[in-house]
Structure formats: structure tokens, C-alpha cells
Amino acid sequence: MHTFLRRALSAGATGLLGLTVVVAGAGAASAHVTVDPAEAEAGGYTLLTFRVPNESDTASTTELEVDLPTDTPFAHVSVEPVPGWTATVTTTELDEPVSVHGAEVTEAVDSVTWTADDADAAIAPGEFRRFAVSAGPVPEVESVVLPAHQTYSDGEVVSWEEVAEGDAEPERPAPVLTVAPAQDSDGATHGGAADADAQGSGETATAEGPVDGAGPWLGAVGLGLGLVGAVTGVLALSRVRRGGSAR
């Protein structure tokens, strides 16, 4: 009986080790430049926070450049100051004027660049930093791609600009802001691609927000609970058998 118990506990320990590897792997896979929130409502303003991890073992991140769309531009963009970093905002003349809330927009911000003032302010290996901009109104599109370019102290530039196709995630995915249709005061949605699709099919448009990264964590938690249950069952069986032997 003791041999059986030792084998069961050993199997449980092996499973828990596997759980750690799965969680660590999930964390490593998400180590790229991302934007938060992942979703915003069309027509409103949002605070876009870019999370920038340093992926190099030897070099520091000294600059981040984020490209903003010019075909469906943000009419207003403001930058949150970051201690030790200098922000540079560039604008461009639009090929064609764009109407935003009844006003004609002829130029828009096309990029924001943050540069470390010195080596001490740079993002060292094993660290990350957040950079934020307030932008709006959010255009009425399905999503806004926000390519980011990360420069290291050794001269390497990593461009996070690839767009996912299907279920496979690209090696260097661009930060993407999903746009939800605007809502009236009574909660009805209007505008955006979801509303247009609903009108064409005769269905009612709904907006569903993504749960970023929830799948791997929920799976890991479920596996852990299952292992705990298995070990508990083995211990209970051991007690029952000892009780039977005593009688």
C-alpha cells in the first residue's frame, strides 16, 4: 500500500512540475509590446497604455516609437509624461480631409516616439515600462493596428508590426485596439463594422469584448485542481484501507 501511495504522490509532483512549465511558457509567449485596453468604444476617447518589456539579456531599451493610423486618424492625441524620457509627437498632412464629429480634420498625429534621456532611464534587461497616450475619438472601424518599434542600446530595432491571420499568432505581433460599436444612452449599439454587418443580415449587432490570455491560465488552474483532487482521493483510500485492516 505504501508503494502505491508513493507512486501516486510522485505522479502528482510530476504533474505539478508540468503545470509550472506550462505557466512559464505562457508568460514567455506574451513577452512583447502590447496595448491596454484591448478594446474601446467607437466615438469615445481612450487612454492607450503601451507595455514594453525588455527582451534582451545584454542591452537596454532606449526608444519606443508607435505609429498611429492616418487613414482613420485620431483627431486628438496627448502624451502622458514619463520621468527620464522625452516624447516627440509628429503630425502629417492627410491625403484627404476627414470629418470627425462634424469638424474637418486636415492633419493628424502619425507617430509618438519616447526616447530615454540617459542610460539610467533606459529599460534594463528583466524590466518593463509603460507609456501612455490619450487618443480620440476612436474611429468607427473593426480594429486599429498600432505598430511599435523598439530600439535597444546595441542598435537593434525590433518592429512589432505583424498582423495575425487566422488563429496563429505571428512572431512579432503589432498592438491592436479592437473597436466596439458605440452605444446610445438606452444601451443600443450603432455605427462600426458590427452594425453594418447586422443591417445586411437582418440580425441585431452585439459587442463582445475579448478575454486576453484567459484560456492558458484557466487551463493551468483546472489542471492544478485536478491534481489536488487526485492526491486527496489517494490519501482517503489509504485511510479506508488501514481502517479495514484494523478490523
Image (cartoon, rainbow, N blue to C red):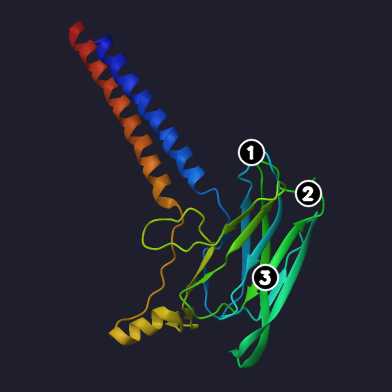
- Residue 90 versus residue 76: which sits nearer the camera? 90
- CA gap between label 3 and label 2 equals 21 Å
Occupied quadrant, residue 222: top left
How many circles with numbers are drawn on the protein?
A: 3
Secondary structure at badge 1 equals loop
- Residue 121 versus residue 9: which sits nearer the camera? 121
The answer to the question of whether label 3 and label 2 lie on touching residues, with beta carbons closer than 8 A, is no
Secondary structure at badge 3 equals strand
Q: Which residue is mark 3?
A: 111
- The relative height of residue 233 versus residue 7 in the rendered view (above or below) is below
Q: Indicate the position of residue 50 as horizontal and vertical percent values.
A: 62, 59
Q: Amino acid at mark 3?
A: Ser
- CA gap between label 1 and label 3 equals 28 Å
> Left or right: 216 with respect to 101?
left
Query: Mark 2 or mark 1: which comes first in sequence?
Result: 1
Occupied quadrant, residue 93: bottom right
Query: Mark 3 or mark 2: which comes first in sequence?
Result: 3
* Image depth: mark 3 or mark 2 in front: 3
Query: Mark 1 or mark 3: which comes first in sequence?
Result: 1
Q: Amino acid at mark 2?
A: Ala
